[in-house]
Structures are given as structure tokens and as C-alpha cells.
């Protein structure tokens, strides 16, 4: 298992895309534990805002603890309504998947962190939408953070969106005590407004230490145990007017006002010096120079999750042995950049469709038994087609077939939909010649990766 000491949750996402003049997705990847629709069920949290906290523990000193080599995976889930010019444009669900590593630690208790942020969107009301999430855009980031929580990050990086939250005072804090600290949000508006650096909106955050709660958890051996978490409420309002950009063309749109609020509960593990999970309500309103108003109202939540390293020679041999014993044909197992990949070659669907044949469902039911042995690892399903001139669009077909396999794995209960992702590569990554029937059969494949990162 990956060591979790010294890690914390990082909010991500932001304003992501404008299509036909409409801003389509947004929000800090923060969190709340109640859903606004049946499709928006939140990620599981250990504590569901109990409302009563133990305040008998006395003063506590809060500090981040960084240890070189510590790694973590963070999942944050955003459930929001998007309004354009006061009309509901759509309900949207976003998933942010973040892989982080402490690459160095300072003598002053600070840490330098590198990571990859992936943001994926599943629009609930999209016709024909699948239940799983398509693997989305990736952002790299590198920053340092002090033991009290202050960021030092270059304008090269657009993630994380919300920075300097939490920041702790350099003293002990008693239950019921409050403090304030400066922070800011940094949004990626390159595609919308051609801004080449993060659009930063400052705020003053108000913190209150509410007390502690005791939650049940599992140790590395799988044994159930209890741990104490410190609950901190963070609230802030933000408002910023933007002056007209220099060298702006007369036809260019730009944000003139950004405002909003956040109301967050942080569940802090003081033994590891890290956030265990958090929940949040948020609202963001942005007005542009063209007079358009974009509003995002929602909830989200996030959790740090551990995972098992699977792309080892031992694990590959074990999976190969299981496949042999289960009698599954046309399967290869290999190590890839993302983890351990099970490649299902010559997978059969209805003619030029994504409808799984019963023979392939039987095969997937067997593979599911293998996947169930890795409960802490996410799954990435990749679709590939053979090159066949005159047939269906290979890119869309590969995407639909990957989604079909992923949806079936979710139906089998291997994972919930927040831990299964899909990709389609069309006919761009053949592993054999398309000149023969045998080669095309190998190229027509679906790859299921048990993810390491």
C-alpha cells in the first residue's frame, strides 16, 4: 500500500469550456455530501456532517507534515447546476482525479509537490450519455507549500484552483476558536478569454475549529479501527472587478466581475498532518464584457484514497495464471504506463455497434473476478478498432465500445461509476497489420487497465 502520511486534499477544476458562446463547466473541486439529483450521488465520506463535535480535547497545533516519497490519489466530485443569463443551461457532474507526490521536504517543514490533475465531465441530461466518466484533460502542476499551508506556485500552472486553504495560525487552537487568513482562486480562462496565466480572485477566509469526531477506518492489513478527526469550518466570500486588459482588441470578450462564496468542512487528521476528506457548498458568478452572466451552484466532496501497486512482475504473473485457470481466450497481460493492462483481443460486438455479445459478457464476468481483487485501484477501459475503410467512424465506435464495457463492469459491481474511466483511440494504435483478418482481429480490442497512478 502507498504511504499516506503528509498528504492533503487539493481542490481542482475551474472554468473549463465555452461552446457556442456558452460557458459549459465550472466549479472548485470541493464538496458537499447531499446530492441534487439521482445521478449526482456523492463519493462516500466517513462523516456526514454530524452537527455535534467533541470539544473536550483542548488546544491543538495544526501543521502539514511532508515526507519525501509520499504519494496519494485524490478524488473530488462536483455536482452543479449551470445557469447562463439566469436560465438553467444544464446539470453537470465533474470528477477530478489527482495523483500527487512529495518530491522533497525542507528543513522548515515545507514540501515540494508534483502532480497530475485530470478533470472529467459527465453531463446528466446529455442524450445517450454513459454512466461512466470519459478520461478527460490532464494538467501537470508543481508547487511548494509551507507547514502552515501557504502556497508558492508559478503562473505556469493552473491547478490547483483554490490555493492557501487551509492556512493554520502558528500557535495552538482550542475548540470554538476562530482565525482568518488570505487565499485566492486561480481559474483557467485560456480557451474562453485567451488569458495565458491563471485568473486570480483573492478572498479572506474565516476559520472555526469546531472540535473532533471519531470515525471508523481500516488499517493497511484491512482491520477495522478508529481514528480521531478535527473538524474545521472554512467560509469565504470573493468579489473582484477586472480592468480592461491591455492591448485588447475591440471584439474581445473578457470577465469584468467574478464573485462567489464557499462554505466548507475540513476533516483533519492531525497524526498524519493531512486532510482526510472535506465537503463544501459553493456558488460562483462571472459576468463578461459582452454582458453575459454565468452562474454555477453546487456541492461536491473529496477524499484521499490509497491504492496498490499492481504493475509488477509478480502481479502480472498472478493475473496471467488466473486468466489461464478461468479459461479465457484471446487475452494478453502487460505492464503499461498507467498500470497493469488486460487486453481483450478480437472482442465481439453487434455489427459496427457497441452492443456487447453474450459471449463477451461471459468473458467480462470472469475478468470481473480478477478486478475484484484490487478494490482500491481505479479502472481505465480503452477501446480500439481495426482500420476498415468505409465502415463506421472508428473514433466514435472505439469510445462507445469502451463505454459499453465499462458500464457492464459497473453493473457487475466491480466498481462504482466514480472509479471507472473510459478512452477511445479509434484505429490509431494498431498492434498488428490491418491487411489480414487475423491482424484486424487483434487490433479490434478493449484494454482494461488496473491503474497504478
Image (cartoon, rainbow, N blue to C red):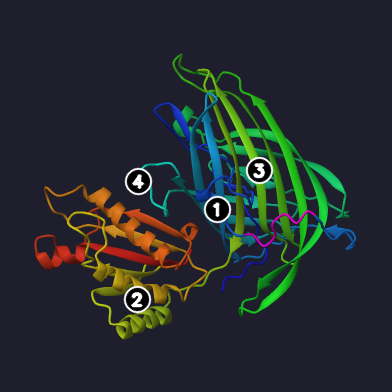
- Please name the residue that numbered disc 1 is placed on: 41
- Please name the residue that numbered disc 4 is placed on: 128
Query: CA separation, marks 1 and 4?
Result: 20 Å
Q: Residues within 10 Å of mark 1 (few under 14, many from 20)?
A: some
Which of the marked residues, 1 or 3, is nearer the chain's N terminus? 1
Name the element at disc 4. loop
Which of the marked residues, 2 or 4, is nearer the chain's N terminus? 4
Start-end of magenta stretch: 45-51
The answer to whether 448 appears left or right of 245 in the picture is left
Name the element at disc 3. strand
Which of the marked residues, 3 or 4, is nearer the chain's N terminus? 4
Badge 1 vs badge 3, beta-carbon distance below 8 Å: no
Which of the marked residues, 1 or 2, is nearer the chain's N terminus? 1
Badge 3 vs badge 4, beta-carbon distance below 8 Å: no
Query: CA separation, marks 3 and 2?
Result: 41 Å
Is 421 covered by the magenta stretch?
no
Residue in view at x 12 percent, y 68 percent? 438
Magenta: main secondary structure equals: loop
Place of residue 36 in the rendered image (x, y in percent of width and height, measured from the top left): 57, 45
Select label 1 or label 3 by which is in front.
Answer: 1
Viewer-nearest residue: 4 or 395: 395
Which of the marked residues, 3 or 2, is nearer the chain's N terminus? 3
Viewer-nearest residue: 416 or 67: 416
- Please name the residue that numbered disc 3 is placed on: 281
- Please name the residue that numbered disc 2 is placed on: 366
Amino acid at each position: 500500500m502507498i504511504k499516506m502520511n503528509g498528504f492533503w486534499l487539493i481542490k481542482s477544476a475551474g472554468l473549463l469550456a465555452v461552446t457556442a458562446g456558452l460557458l459549459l463547466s465550472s466549479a472548485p473541486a470541493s464538496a458537499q455530501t447531499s446530492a441534487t439529483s439521482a445521478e449526482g450521488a456523492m463519493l462516500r465520506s466517513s462523516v456526514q456532517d454530524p452537527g455535534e463535535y467533541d470539544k473536550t480535547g483542548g488546544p491543538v497545533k495544526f501543521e502539514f507534515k511532508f515526507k519525501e516519497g509520499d504519494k496519494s490519489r485524490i478524488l473530488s466530485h462536483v455536482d452543479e447546476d449551470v445557469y447562463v443569463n439566469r436560465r438553467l443551461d444544464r446539470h453537470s457532474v465533474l470528477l477530478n482525479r489527482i495523483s500527487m507526490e512529495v518530491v522533497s521536504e525542507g528543513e522548515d517543514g515545507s514540501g515540494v509537490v508534483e502532480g497530475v490533475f485530470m478533470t472529467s465531465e459527465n453531463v446528466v441530461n446529455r442524450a445517450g450519455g454513459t454512466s461512466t466518466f470519459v478520461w478527460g484533460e490532464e494538467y501537470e502542476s508543481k508547487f511548494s507549500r509551507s507547514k502552515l499551508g501557504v502556497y508558492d506556485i508559478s503562473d505556469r500552472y493552473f491547478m490547483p484552483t483554490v490555493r492557501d486553504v487551509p492556512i493554520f495560525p502558528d500557535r495552538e487552537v482550542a475548540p470554538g476558536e476562530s482565525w482568518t487568513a488570505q487565499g485566492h482562486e486561480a481559474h483557467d480562462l485560456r480557451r474562453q478569454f485567451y488569458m495565458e496565466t491563471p485568473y486570480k480572485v483573492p478572498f479572506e477566509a474565516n476559520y472555526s475549529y469546531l472540535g473532533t469526531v471519531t470515525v471508523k477506518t481500516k488499517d493497511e492489513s484491512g482491520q477495522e479501527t478508529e481514528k480521531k478527526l478535527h473538524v474545521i469550518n472554512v467560509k469565504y466570500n470573493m468579489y473582484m472587478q477586472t480592468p480592461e486588459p491591455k492591448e485588447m482588441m475591440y471584439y474581445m470578450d473578457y470577465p469584468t466581475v467574478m464573485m462567489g462564496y464557499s462554505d466548507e468542512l475540513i476533516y483533519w487528521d492531525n497524526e498524519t498532518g493531512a486532510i482526510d476528506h472535506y465537503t463544501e457548498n459553493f456558488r460562483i458568478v462571472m459576468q463578461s464584457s459582452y454582458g453575459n452572466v454565468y452562474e454555477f451552484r453546487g456541492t461536491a466532496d473529496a477524499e484521499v484514497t490509497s491504492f496498490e501497486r499492481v504493475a509488477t512482475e509478480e502481479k502480472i504473473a498472478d493475473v496471467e495464471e488466473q486468466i489461464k485457470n478461468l479459461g479465457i481466450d484471446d487475452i494478453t497481460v502487460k505492464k503499461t504506463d498507467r498500470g497493469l493492462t488486460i487486453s481483450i483481443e478480437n472482442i465481439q460486438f453487434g455489427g459496427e455497434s457497441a452492443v456487447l455479445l453474450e459471449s463477451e459478457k461471459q468473458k467480462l464476468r470472469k475478468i470481473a473476478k480478477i478486478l475484484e481483487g484490487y478494490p482500491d485501484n481505479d479502472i481505465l477501459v480503452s477501446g480500439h478498432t481495426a482500420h476498415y475503410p468505409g465502415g463506421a467512424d472508428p473514433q466514435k465506435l472505439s469510445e462507445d465500445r469502451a463505454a459499453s464495457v465499462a458500464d457492464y463492469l459497473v453493473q457487475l459491481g466491480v466498481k462504482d461509476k466514480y472509479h471507472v474511466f473510459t478512452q477511445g483511440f479509434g484505429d490509431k494504435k494498431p498492434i498488428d497489420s490491418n491487411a489480414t483478418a487475423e491482424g484486424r482481429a487483434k487490433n479490434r480490442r478493449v484494454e482494461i487497465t488496473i491503474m497504478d497512478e
